[in-house]
């Protein structure tokens, strides 16, 4: 069988419709089938990534309509890397949540697994599509599944967070449609490569209006300040594997969409500086908000927003090294933050309390999980033996190359804030006196496997970053080489 | 040529202006309702109105004076110049379906919120804050 990028989208869609039927025959279908689909996605993404690194480019035409007319799926080293990352983490999160939701009664788990799978599939769709309207459709798939998953628990206050997210999300989708409309009237096409080709002839005023609409709409998805008010609520109210997915998958797709629009579609000068400024403000505000949180998941959510800010700064610097660092940081953020959510939710599960105070001395009860949480906390701040160090190091180096001294000072100051609240949490886990006795829930085996794999990745990449740097350099080059993208798609 | 078409041609610019103007007005009204109103259902209505405005704008963009449906049929093989642009119409269909899904989900969340808080006024629902 020939493997093609279409399978990324077709397999989850088919499974999503088949699961309700299959679960009439086999009761556990809803839990097992998404795992099979996500595993299959993982396999094809590795095969395709290898193919891309040999051929350099895959442009898959759908239904026989050539590129400018039909929808096409584009795999460059950059998108293939992100798609692989999202698929692998999607599978890891499924593995983690496999037994977690067994406690839910009735058929509820069925909807959870279907939505979770569709959210991951939609994110991959955002990443690999080459058509701007198709990207809108996938963003909406991600959005609708994410709103429903945020409101998943009836007893929690999920509906409020879900409604907030939905409100901001549907404003974003209207703005995105307007931006697409302006682009379509000016260039007469929806294909991203062709838009990029014709963008030079578009009047500057139209360019600016559509760019502003794009930045607002995609800034909401990418959690850019001040459009990220939904993020902490959604992260903290959603089921734990979903919080991990928001951090590892959805925000990656949002940042990708923003970066693709800014780097490939538009050639407006100054937008890079805008990304640096907004990225820095996002990071600063989020980290300051994180330090004052009393709730573990909210703290992690704000930290997540802060990381996205740093990614935007790095993309804004725009040199090859900076983009390389940004992609590296996206990888680190996805792996480490999902590990933090996975381990952190076991603390919450064991204390029935989301507050940080409840984490006091929990390492006695959960020694292994606590160790993994601490490793992830050190890694995300950027301590040397872990992978988080390298991405921050490369971003700071690239800022130094461009002589942005204030930016470096700013990033380091924010890192200190980050250091304070992560060390405080780790200190609480290990050195504070235990307060409450609560029911004990040992982590299940599959969750342990998922968490251990992610931790192993953090340590291995931290010691041997050369394993992936070559590929990441290719990815950065492919994002910056706009002419090649246009040429390969419209060939 | 019947009477309607004559009127249509005579006031072509005015009608174009009216269509674009009402689309933009709908967007502004929807945005106003969504951002200012306090009642959850009114907010959802505002979002729907805004979407309707965007959709109308899409259709208006693809419109051609005296255009025909974009179908090549016998006798109409060379009429491509007179056809309305089919792409915005296809986009609008997709956008309407997505808008429908979002509105349905929003209303179900409103019901859930109402059951949980016994009110639909957003000023009284604020257990989640920054």
Image (cartoon, coloured by chain):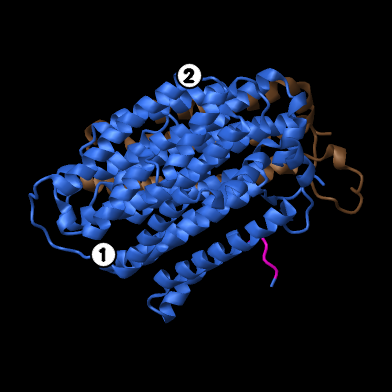
- Looking at the image, which residue is at 8% across and 52% down? A436
Question: In the rendered view, would you say A182 is above or below A301?
Answer: above
Position of residue A474 measured from the top left corner of the image (x, y, whole percent): 65, 45
Q: Chain of mark 1?
A: A
Query: Image quadrant of residue A486?
Result: top right
Q: Chain of mark 2?
A: A
Chain that the image shows in blue? A
- Looking at the image, which residue is at 49% across and 70% down? A36
Q: Which residue is mark 2?
A: A405
Compute the Cα span from label 2 to label 1: 45 Å
Query: Image quadrant of residue A302?
Result: top left
Query: What is the number of callouts on the image?
Result: 2
Chain that the image shows in brown? B
In what quadrant of the picture does the N terminus of chain A appear? Answer: bottom right
Q: Determine the secondary structure under disc 2.
A: helix
Q: For label 2, count other residues whose C-alpha is less than 10 Å away and answer few (under 14), some (14-19) or many (20+).
A: few
Give a yes or no on whether discs 2 and 1 share a subunit.
yes
Q: Which residue is mark 1?
A: A443
Magenta span covers which residues?
A2-6
């Amino acid at each position: 069988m020939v493997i093609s990028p279409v399978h990324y989208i077709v397999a989850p869609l088919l499974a999503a419709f088949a699961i309700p039927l299959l679960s009439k025959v086999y009761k556990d279908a809803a839990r097992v089938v998404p795992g099979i689909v996500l595993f299959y996605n993982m396999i094809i993404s590795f095969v395709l990534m290898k193919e891309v690194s040999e051929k350099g480019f895959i442009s898959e035409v759908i239904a026989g309509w050539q590129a400018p007319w039909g929808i096409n799926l584009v795999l460059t080293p950059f998108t293939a890397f992100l798609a692989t990352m999202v698929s692998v983490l999607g599978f890891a999160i499924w593995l983690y949540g496999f037994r977690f939701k067994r406690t839910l009664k009735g058929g509820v788990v069925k909807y959870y697994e279907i939505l979770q799978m569709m959210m991951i599939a939609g994110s991959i769709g955002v990443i690999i599509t080459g058509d701007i309207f198709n990207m809108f459709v996938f963003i909406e798939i991600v959005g609708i599944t994410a709103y429903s998953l945020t409101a998943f628990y009836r007893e929690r206050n999920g509906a409020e967070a879900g409604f907030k997210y939905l409100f901001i999300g549907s404003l974003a989708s209207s703005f995105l449609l307007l931006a697409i409309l302006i682009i379509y009237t000016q260039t007469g096409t929806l294909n991203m490569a062709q838009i990029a080709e014709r963008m030079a002839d578009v009047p500057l005023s139209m360019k600016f209006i559509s760019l502003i609409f794009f930045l607002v709409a995609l800034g909401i998805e990418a959690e850019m300040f001040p459009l990220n008010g939904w993020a902490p609520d959604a992260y903290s109210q959603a089921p734990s594997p979903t919080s991990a997915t928001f951090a590892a998958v959805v925000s990656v797709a949002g940042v990708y969409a923003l970066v693709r629009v800014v780097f490939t579609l538009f050639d407006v000068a100054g937008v890079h500086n805008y990304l640096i400024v907004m990225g820095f403000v996002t990071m600063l505000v989020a980290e300051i908000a994180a330090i004052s949180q009393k709730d573990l998941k909210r703290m992690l959510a704000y930290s997540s927003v802060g990381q996205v800010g740093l990614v935007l700064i790095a993309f804004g610097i725009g040199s090859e090294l900076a983009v390389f660092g940004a992609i590296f940081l996206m990888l680190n953020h996805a792996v480490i933050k999902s590990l933090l959510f996975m381990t952190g939710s076991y603390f919450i599960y064991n204390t029935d309390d989301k507050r940080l105070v409840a984490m006091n001395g929990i390492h006695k009860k959960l020694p292994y999980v606590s160790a993994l949480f601490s490793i992830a906390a050190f890694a995300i701040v950027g301590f040397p033996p872990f992978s988080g160090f390298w991405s921050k190091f490369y971003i700071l180096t690239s800022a130094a190359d461009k002589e942005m001294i204030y930016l470096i000072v700013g990033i380091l100051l924010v890192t200190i804030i980050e250091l304070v609240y992560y060390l405080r949490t780790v200190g609480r886990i290990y050195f504070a006196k235990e307060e409450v006795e609560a029911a004990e829930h040992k982590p299940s085996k599959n969750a342990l496997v998922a968490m251990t794999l992610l931790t192993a990745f953090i340590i291995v990449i931290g010691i041997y970053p050369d394993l992936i740097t070559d590929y990441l350099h290719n990815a950065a080059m492919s994002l910056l080489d706009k002419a090649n993208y246009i040429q390969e798609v419209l060939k | 040529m019947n009477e309607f078409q004559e009127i249509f041609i005579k006031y072509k610019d005015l009608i174009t202006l009216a269509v674009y103007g009402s689309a933009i007005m709908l967007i502004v009204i929807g945005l106003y309702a969504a951002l200012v109103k306090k009642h959850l259902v009114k907010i959802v209505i505002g979002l729907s109105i805004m979407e309707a405005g965007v959709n109308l704008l899409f259709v208006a963009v693809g419109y051609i004076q005296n255009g025909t449906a974009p179908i090549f049929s016998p006798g109409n093989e060379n009429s491509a110049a007179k056809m309305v642009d089919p792409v915005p119409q296809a986009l609008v269909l997709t956008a309407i379906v997505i808008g429908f899904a979002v509105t349905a989900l929003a209303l179900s969340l409103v019901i859930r919120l109402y059951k949980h808080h016994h009110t639909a006024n957003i000023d009284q629902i604020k257990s989640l804050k920054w």
